[in-house]
Amino acid sequence: MKRRCPWGEQTASMKHYHDTVWGVPEYDDQLLFRKLMLDINQAGLSWQTILNKSASFDEAYDFFSIGKVAEYTEAKINELMENKGIIRNRRKIEAAVANAQGVQKIQHEFGSFADYLWSFSDHQVINHSYKEQNEVPTTSPLSDQIAKDLKQRGFKFIGSTTIYAFLEAVGIVNDHLDHCFRKQEVSQMGKGE
């Protein structure tokens, strides 16, 4: 029987997410932006809630097209506030617009959002070693640094805790527990540079 991180055993959708998505190194700007926005929307809520609404989020936010979200108007924000399929928090919706614009500026400066993010870890997966879930931190000096830099670049609703969860989700940080079958699989996926 495969051993997983305990949180990955909670529901069928969490198991699927844990086994196929969480911690896989991501280099696609569109998918990185999507994951960042889903992590921002998760703030104060459970990840299960976001997973349950992910298809609605994709539809409501034009599949998180960076270019489209960056041009959302006040009318579009008001429309999203009426959408019961997503998290209707005006600050989080406004953050999507500001952050899409921020991603565009980073793409212009660094070539891609991925290159910018992965540069913080020298384009390597950071493999941690934890035996128990309660050992895994919710922030780190790296998440502090990235959150601070993103805030200086005009990103909204960004804190170290959200960024740490994002770094885990996109595989920059590998926090699968030592006994988890995904630990080794994920650690060998980073392309490095």
Image: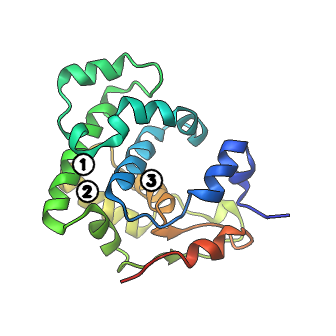
Mark 2–mark 3 CB contact (< 8 Å): no
Residue type pointed to by label 1: Phe
Question: Could you tell me which secondary element the residue under label 1 belongs to?
Answer: loop
Task: Please tell me which of labels 1 and 2 falls first in the chain.
Answer: 2
**Residue at 33 percent of width and 52 percent of height:** 30
Disc 3 marks which residue?
Answer: 161
The quadrant the C terminus occupies is bottom left
Nearest to the observer: residue 42 or residue 38: 38
Question: Could you tell me which secondary element the residue under label 3 belongs to?
Answer: helix
Please provide percent x and percent y for residue 146. 32, 63
Q: Residues within 10 Å of mark 2 (few under 14, many from 20)?
A: some
Residue type pointed to by label 2: Leu
Tell me how far mark 3 sits from mark 1, CA to CA. Answer: 15 Å
Nearest to the observer: residue 146 or residue 59: 59
Mark 1–mark 2 CB contact (< 8 Å): yes
Please provide percent x and percent y for residue 155. 24, 48
Residue 182 left/right relative to 163: right
Disc 1 marks which residue?
Answer: 155
- Which label sits in the foreground, 3 or 1? 1
**Residue at 24 percent of width and 64 percent of height:** 112
Give me the disc on residue 191: none
Disc 2 marks which residue?
Answer: 150
